[in-house]
Image (spheres, rainbow, N blue to C red):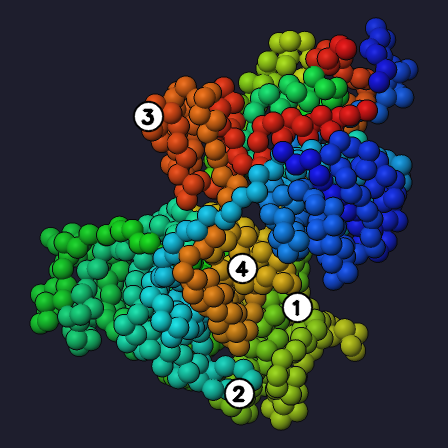
Amino acid sequence: MSKRTGVFVCHCGKNIAATVDVKKVARELAKDDGVVFCEDYVYMCSDPGQGAVIDAIKENDLDGMVISCCSPTLHEKTFRDASELGGLSGFRCEIANIREQCSWVHKDPDEATDKAIKISRAAVRRVQRNEPLDPIGVPVTRRALVVGGGIAGIQTALDLADAGLDVILVEKQSTIGGNMLKLSETFPTLDCSQCILSPKMVAVSKNPRIRLLTESEVESVSGFVGNFRVRIKKKAQYVDPELCKLCDDCSQVCPVAVPNEYDEGLTNRRAIFIPFAQAIPASFTLDEAACLGLKPVVCGKCEEVCEAGAIDFDKRPTVFEEEVGAIVVATGYDLYGMDKLGEYGAGRYADVLDGLQFERLCSASGATEGHILRPSDHKVPKEIVFIQCSGSRDPENHCAWCSKICCMYTAKHATLYKHHVPDGQAYVFYIDIRSGGKGYEEFVQRSMEKDGVIYLRGRVSRVYEQGGKLRVLGVDTLSGRNVEIAADMVVLAQAMEPSKGTAEIAKTLKIGLGKDGFLAEAHPKLKPVESVTAGIYLAGAAQGPKDIPETVAQASAAASKVIALLSKEELHHSPTVAKVRDPYCTGCAMCVDACPYEAIGLVGGKAAVNEVLCQGCGSCVGVCVRAAIDVKNVSQLQIHEMISAVLAA
Amino acid sequence: MPNSSQSPAPEAQAHEPRVVAFLCKWCSSAGSDLAGVSRIQYSANATPITIPCTGSMSPLYVLSAFNKGADGVLVSGCHPGDCHYMEGNYLARRKLYLVKQLLQFVGLEAERFRMSWVSAAEGAKFAEVIDEFVGDLRPLGPQTRLKAKH
């Protein structure tokens, strides 16, 4: 037990000292048993502050230390490191949080000072019984899992493989490429999306370090940073990609026609089909929901014509487990549902399109082979209206957030439209133009000046059909006039929302979601690619709306985090794990059942803890009726001491 | 500490409840940090003790706090389904429900023991939980039922 404790009370400038009488805290704590040194200082975390800690440890031969300052999430590490430099085990240093939990939330100086004393005193009583522990080394699995095969997942997987790591890339759909594969051109350079993406997709398929699992989903995850165990379910592979020759004979005979989701429903596809010519894996795939052949009495035509013998209706889904050291989640976005935008005629009129449908119209690989035609009558639209912020920036009715990319892609759409239909007129309704980015503002200006796109600042109230035209009622707030446009086509720049299944994958991986449903980063500024769970990282639009360059940057950032993590020989695991007090253990095995990590077993009739598996949650402590098990440095005795300190008169 | 009386009303006015708040490190403690960062003001009557998980709560902690003179005990953990350690909060919920029954059985007001779910993102809720609890404790006056008599 520590008999020579030092206490340091930080002013944090005025952050603490304005409310808490720090001198009084130091004076009061100096009276406590075993406290031999007590000091206050303006900024404990500064270099001189840390220097004072190191000196005090040496000069006063301290064997325990409490820093009363900000939350331990901020500076516990700082002071534990300083402690080590002074020759004192970092685990003999505890933080008393008198800022977030005290000075910032109370106004009355007496009350705040009183509470700060209690918090500090509890920390002193605790640290006096802390053991000097050494971190536990845990081996690392040098393999990573990437969830989601859009541009974010592709970039992450390539970077990881490039660093010599084995990667498992899991994608729900039958090809990688995600939303980017559906785009025609990309802003602000107007380079062809598929042309810049497909080399990366091919690189994924050719990289021996990347194991690509399409039509697969993560079912469950257990373990912890460095050593996750992942259960993956892969749908039945009715078409063997190794054997498929891409001859197209199968889809020619398939009698089924369903809307093609890869073409945003603008065309139909067969039950056996290839999503894109550039699909990776390069193979036809069978949609089991649409196929009649799974009941072979009904159909089975494709199997008959397949000369390669690539089709097998008897295939079953497979479920298997893999071990990985780190996970990157890159599950991307979906467009805000058209069904929720009825005021713009979405879902009612064939010529009211969403942003991705318009991309498919512009794309050479799309339904119209790159000609912009109305879905209703295949005529060239001569007047076209783009409505920005469809569903964005509307907390009362839709999404509260700005979807960030719509200003830019609308400018791109309007420009592309003018390139396709030089004699047509494009109108854009907007609230603000947000074009922060290299070359972005110039691009928007060019669409106005060179391509004559008319920008109207205001919202659209209603879209309805009359005389074969879509009448768009809106307002131009700059001139203060109502505007009515008889358009041939309306394109909505919808909000981005987290892709379907984001909440489920977050739950499976035990990572957080923000209020908006996007994946939550560990810190909004300083840990933008880390999730709240160690070893799990975020990339791309699943974390928040972002464009391609930002997505690629975040993907590479996530990859570099994983590379740093997995470059270690072993990871250090916190040594604050459970410890059995042998004489009191009766071997009742209540703790064995309570442990969520299967870290406790019975050895010789008594509980024994596997320190590598133990996460220090203390579930065992809560169930042990004889108080025979403790978590190191938060023992039951320590908690009782803290309770006493908190309630001392 | 004032002693209990048959009619606590006038004395209860003067009595400031003393609360021990056991906070899960992963959610409610982080939530209290967020309340701090957001400068949300709340009652100073509750002193926090951070624990690894509400699942680690021994029933003895609750009894010990009342024995040492707490007027109220709060246990705040992660929302059901969100436990950092998978199921610790379920363990806590089952166990602490029994503790509450026990406390009532020995004659303590049920309002003196409370469990709440506050996530790391719920700074404002943390402040509300504390204020509400302290507000509910005030009319009860000092807790003497389980307090050590010496």
Query: Which chain contains the residue that carries disc 3?
Result: A
Mark 3 burial class by Cα count in 10 Å: few <14, some 14-19, many 20+: few
User: What amino acid type should be assigned to the residue bearing mark 4?
Assistant: Glu
Name the residue beneath numbered marker 3: A604
Q: Which of the two labelled residues, at mark 1 and mark 3, occupies the earlier sequence position?
A: 1
CA gap, disc 3 to disc 2? 71 Å
User: What amino acid type should be assigned to the residue bearing mark 1?
Assistant: Val
The answer to which of B77 and A518 lies nearer the viewer is B77
Horizontal side of A214 relative to A184 (left or right) equals left
Query: Which chain contains the residue that carries disc 4?
Result: A
Name the residue beneath numbered marker 4: A530
Give the secondary structure at mark 3.
loop
CA gap, disc 2 to disc 4? 31 Å
Q: Are marks 4 and 1 in contact (CB under 8 Å)?
A: no
Q: For the point 9% across and 72% down, which residue is it? A: A307
Q: Which of the two labelled residues, at mark 2 and mark 4, occupies the earlier sequence position?
A: 2
